Image (spheres, rainbow, N blue to C red):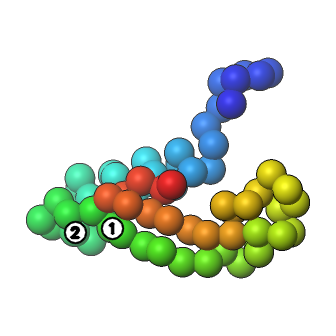
């Protein structure tokens, strides 16, 4: 997001937290990433026409997609 100030999105914040957990030797000591496919609490239809993909939670190698 750029206007009015440069800000982080929620997905960027979650990805950064997951990456720092791995680097600090937290959950995954062999530096393998977390991979998750799940549904979100809100269905895609509740996001409207622009949120077709918001009904899914996809995490690949600690990156929230």
Which element type, helix, strand or loop, lies under badge 2? loop
Query: Earlier along the polypeptide chain: callout 1 or callout 2?
Result: 2
| Residue bearing the label numbered 1 | 34
Q: Residue at x 15, y 67 (%)?
A: 29
* In the depicted structure, whether residue 56 falls above or below residue 20: below
Q: How many marks?
A: 2
Of 27 and 43, nearer the camera is 43
In the image: residue 12, left or right of residue 9 = left
Point out which mark residue 45 bears: none
* In the depicted structure, whether residue 22 falls above or below residue 9: below
* In the depicted structure, whether residue 20 falls above or below residue 45: above
The reply to whether discs 1 and 2 touch (Cβ–Cβ < 8 Å) is: yes
In the image: residue 6, left or right of residue 47 = left
| Residue bearing the label numbered 2 | 28
Which element type, helix, strand or loop, lies under badge 1? loop
Of 4 and 63, nearer the camera is 63
Q: Position of residue 6 (x, y in %)?
A: 66, 24
Q: Position of residue 48 (x, y in %)?
A: 87, 60
Quarter assignment of residue 59: bottom left
């Amino acid at each position: 997001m750029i206007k009015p100030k440069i800000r982080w999105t929620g997905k960027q914040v979650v990805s950064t937290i997951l990456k720092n957990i791995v680097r600090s030797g937290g959950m995954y000591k062999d530096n393998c990433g977390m991979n998750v496919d799940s549904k979100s609490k809100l269905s895609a239809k509740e996001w409207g026409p622009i949120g077709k993909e918001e009904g899914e939670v996809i995490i690949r190698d600690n990156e929230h997609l």
